[in-house]
Amino acid sequence: MANLRDHMGRPIVAVTGIGVVTSLGVGKADNWTALTSGKSGIHPIIRFPVDHLNTRISGMVDFLPSSSKGASPLTYELAETAAQEAVSEAGLDSGDFGGPLFLASPPVELDWADRFSLYNSDKKDAGAERLLRVARALKELDIFETTQFGSIADRLADRFGTRGLPITLSTACASGATAIQLGVEAIRRGECDKALSIGADGSATAEALIRFSLLSALSTHNDIPEKASKPFSKDRDGFVLAEGSGALVLESLEAALARGATILGIMRGCGERADDFHRTRSKPDASPAIATVRAALADAGLSEDEIDYVNAHGTSTPENDKMEHLSLSTVFGERVGSMPISSNKSMIGHTLSAAGAVEAAFSLMTMRESVIPPTINYDNPDPAIVLDVVPNKKRNAEVGTVLSNSFGFGGQNTCLVMAREPV
Amino acid sequence: MSSPHDVVITGIGLVSSLGEGPDAHWQKLTRPGLEPVLDAVRFAPYTIHPLPEIDWNLQIAKRGDQRQMETWQRLGTYAAGLALDDAGIKGNDELCTTMDMVVAAGGGERDEAVDAAILAASESRNDRDVLLNEKLTTELRPTLFLAQLSNLLAGNISIVHKVTGSSRTFMGEEGAGVSAVETAAARIRSGQSTHVLVGGAFQTEHSDMLLGYELAGYLHRGPWRPVWQRQGAEGGGVVTGSGGAFLVLEQREHAKSRGRKIYAELGPVVSGRARRRRGELNAEIATLLKQAALPNGELLTISGASGAHAATAAEKDVLDANPALAVRAFSTLTGHMKEAQFPFAVALAALAVDRKAGYPAFDATVERQFESVPTTVLATAIGYHQFEGLGLIKAA
């Protein structure tokens, strides 16, 4: 009989359902096949014209019905699709989930297509005045709801019958991990015995791309798109903007076992720490990232040498990969050169608000399948970053514990520690 | 009975058209017949409650930091600084690095001039997607993205005030403010946090911030009226205001051990999501009131009612059904501050408890007298469109 409480006396949190969508496809099966065969989902942008753009590639999800309908509809569909997969796998009623919802999703704005159509619907006055006048005459709420930060979660709450006021959150690139952390914490506090945590991001609009471009954050290796994301390589030049979603059904181990659910993995620990150094750069000594990893280990009750594999944040930006290496080598010491550390983003790009959840899903599958997905495009290693990045080809390995890193713009860092088995 | 893990309020940072800080707000709001500060011209036909004059240097020392933020982020960072100062935490490294933070945020300000130019050009061009690329790649200020990004209010609070224990940003209008306070309190009660900075800000003086309401026709038009008197008037009933509210929530034991003044105890905070299209709002508010377990006797109620016709009518119906409640809708005097609405309500409730006095009616034609000493105060935030929450604030 497994322990039902962790080293701090809190309920152990199990994962009983996993769902995922990325540019590699819909669902765990397709994603896992592609990911472990080293396939890239990065492709030329087809959603909008690329005239004047320095970056013309992305990991957009172009194959869903909402893919061309704007950021809010696509984010909703991504979230719904992943959540449906997770809830079904958990064997729970997908219309009456009965636990809280935590959604990591991008900030919303009025879509340009809507801005244009509202503006050009008449010719009186100009600028904001015209938009406001036209807006107040609208008879439908569709456009309005795309501008409300709580609306995607509200629809998901209706769709899945989650309980209470759903929480929509953003911690930038750490958002997906934060959504999971919030679910874990709610169960540990005894507020619920299950939670639905989703990270979803369908916001790869032209404006989003341009904004990241203006910050010099994106790769401009347009010629061979599938080669553009090259974490830990010497010639890495930025991340690849991408879309996707990951969803986990979290349950107290006790509740999951009581209803005979299959345990897919254990959420052992979560750690977080904010950086106060700069809006886009991390503190040069990596102390916030180091503290985040250590906090996650402490929360999990594991020591450094009890982590088998690291699912890296590994964005492929010069800054992140350098700082991530510094933080991991500080925490893991000499062991860092021999422990497998790979980046899913080499294949799926950076799914932003979804990344932490997508990568948690892949981390859990890594343990279940005993296969570590590779870091592809590792042809030109950065000599300053000596890591076993599981280069280019998957590796069969028993993995009992995973550390998954998420480090965000704005200094928001979150790490998750997952385990294959209960203690 | 107090317990060591009780949640108490030890810091309040407020900004609204009425001024800044708890004292200024208390003095103004306890003045019977106070007139609101209004600007009916700049965004006509909409009236707004504008920001007061603020010397940003007082809370954001570096000009460089100020330049990296648009007004919304600056306002939130400023209000957060006021709360930290008030709690004696600002500048205390040990307390700041162990402090958790939950910020309720919407979005920041887009570049109105760039947007207007693109819209104007769109009238004569059919290749609008190309137009967009052309203008945005050349005319957007590169760092504007960060200056408007939702989670960067929290990011800036970390940078400017060094709050680095943890940082979370909740989104979703009034509901985000409710969840932020609720989650922060739950962390403290469970022993996960000892002290948490929680709050939000809203900067309404930007056309997109008005558009966010007006796409559903929520804004009140025509002559200004108090919150409770907008039913049937032109428009949708909401008059917005710029402002911010941050609270320092602290474990009672932690606050006592460092000898801090305690404004009030934060009692139960409850939240919900009525399916309003099915007419569930009245019943949901009534359920929340039950869950909060109101004390017997007269109860001062700080209502965050927005003025939005349907939501405000529902809230009024349910509150009116309980004759013990003496309601004060502060948006009459401050305007609706969206994500900051609930933290603001909690702050005003805490002040009343601390000063052992209620507020005079903000709208004497509707709100009844309250002459008792409030030992418990109810704070509400019923979303103008979705999500509801309320909490009880008690004498420390």
Image: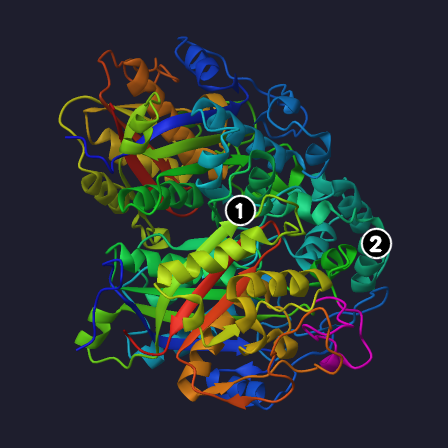
Viewed as shown, does residue B199 lie left or right of B256? right
Question: What residue is pinned by disc 2?
Answer: B135
Viewed as shown, does residue B332 lie left or right of A314? left
Frontmost residue, A391 versus A189: A391
- Asked which quadrant contains residue B332, the reply is top left
Frontmost residue, B144 versus A356: A356
Question: Do the residues at pointers 1 and 2 share their chain?
Answer: yes
Q: Residue at x 69, y 70 (%)?
A: A240
Q: Residue at x 62, y 23 (%)?
A: B40
Q: Residue at x 58, y 26 (%)?
A: B47
Which of the two labelled residues, at mark 1 and mark 2, occupies the earlier sequence position? 2
Q: Where in the figure is residue A418, as x and y percent of width and height? A: 40, 71
Viewed as shown, does residue A27 lie left or right of A385? left
Distance, label 1 to label 2, CA atoms, is 29 Å
- Asked which quadrant contains residue B241, the reply is top right
Q: Where in the figure is residue A16, as x and y percent of width and height? A: 32, 76
Residue type for callout 2? Lys
Q: Residue at x 73, y 77 (%)?
A: A381
Q: Is residue A24 magenta?
A: no
Q: Is residue A224 magenta?
A: yes
**At numbered mark 2, what does the secondary structure look like: helix, strand or loop?**
helix
Q: Where in the figure is residue A140, as x and y percent of width and height? A: 53, 55
The magenta span reads A219-239
**Residue B216: which disc?**
1
Is residue B202 placed above or below A138 in the rendered structure? above
